[in-house]
Image: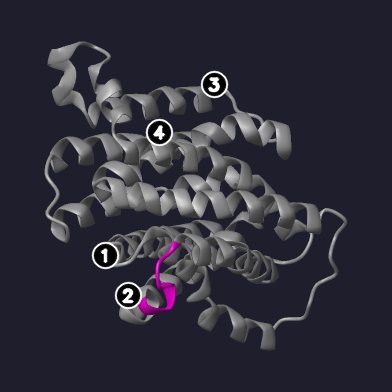
Amino acid sequence: MIWFLYSILCALFESLKDVAGKKSLKNIDEYVVAWSLRFFALPILIPFLLFIKIPPLGEQFWIALLVSGSLNIVATILFFKALKSSDLSIVIPMVTFTPIFLLITSPLLVHELPNALGIAGIILGVIGAYIMKIKEISKGYLAPFKSLLKEKGPKLMLLVAFIWSITSNFDKIGVQNSSPIFWVISINFMLILGMLPIMLYKSQKPTTQIMRGKKILLLMGLFSAISVIFQMTAINLTLVAYVISIKRTSVVMGVIFGALIFKEKGIKERLIGAVIMVISVLIIGLS
């Protein structure tokens, strides 16, 4: 059950990364934050190169790196666009749809098939999302869904969740064709290189922005690196869906942080909805 501990630690540092990211977006644009997330993870990742041997690379390593890296560039930028557009407590719960999407993508990519319990988890996840906007029900039974999808942040995060349902499987392929730490370092370098020209093209005075927010950006990068190391180690020990399910408990932490740190409103419904969505994720994992 060591994978369970790794997954819980992954969730904790994931939630801390989200808080740091939200704070940094007050004064820094999303392209700089997205690139910094990967760049400032290097201080904790590079030292591992001194202690690990480069593993023999399997035939599928480079394909997995290309696919996961390319898609994660898009997902990382969209993630911070979503975080910038809406409250932390309404956006972060949308990532719980990743395990739901995994029930579609995993059978195709790594041949992990869902069962009846997995289907029940999907239904419960949708109910949780509905409850987050339950106050809108007076406008019609579908109003909570319509209200949720009218906001830019939740819509973008749903797209991120779908992309992650694909990259999670390629991450597993990458780990199986190398090693957990080597994969994390490889994918991180690819994202840094891939997002650099995007940042330079889209951002105004990126160096100035980075220097202005270097402390919070460094914290965000460190939290992210620790989270990903725990995630990659865990998925090498068990099913992708198990790890991603436990990781999504960070959603509840994110909603609570949204209330405590950012003073966001409507937390009661969002917290209840988030808890239900996390339970759905756990059911999917158990399935």
Query: Mark 2 or 1 closer to N-term?
Result: 1
At horizontal 38% and vertical 50% (from top left) the residue drawn is 81
Q: Amino acid at mark 1?
A: Lys
- Crowd around label 2: few <14 · some 14–19 · many ≥20 (10 Å): some
Query: Mark 2 or 3 closer to N-term?
Result: 3
According to the picture, the residue beneath numbered tag 3 turns out to be 116
- State the count of labels: 4
Q: Quadrant of residue 185?
A: bottom right
Which of the two discs, 4 and 3, sits closer to the camera?
4
Residue 281 % position (x, y): 44, 38
Question: How far apart are the alpha carbons under marks 2 and 3?
Answer: 44 Å
Which of the two discs, 2 and 3, sits closer to the camera?
2
According to the picture, the residue beneath numbered tag 1 turns out to be 23
According to the picture, the residue beneath numbered tag 2 turns out to be 216
- Crowd around label 4: few <14 · some 14–19 · many ≥20 (10 Å): many
Q: Secondary structure at mark 4?
A: helix
According to the picture, the residue beneath numbered tag 4 turns out to be 280
Q: Who is closer to the viewer here, 239 or 158? A: 158
Q: Which mark is residue 58?
A: none
Question: How far apart are the alpha carbons under marks 3 and 1?
Answer: 40 Å
Which residue range is magenta in the image? 203-208
Q: Are the two marked residues, 2 and 1, in contact with CB atoms closer than 8 angstroms?
A: yes
Which of the two discs, 1 and 4, sits closer to the camera?
1
Q: Determine the residue located farthest toward the right in the rendered image.
A: 59
Which of the two discs, 3 and 1, sits closer to the camera?
1
- Crowd around label 1: few <14 · some 14–19 · many ≥20 (10 Å): some
> Magenta stretch containing residue 207, yes or no?
yes
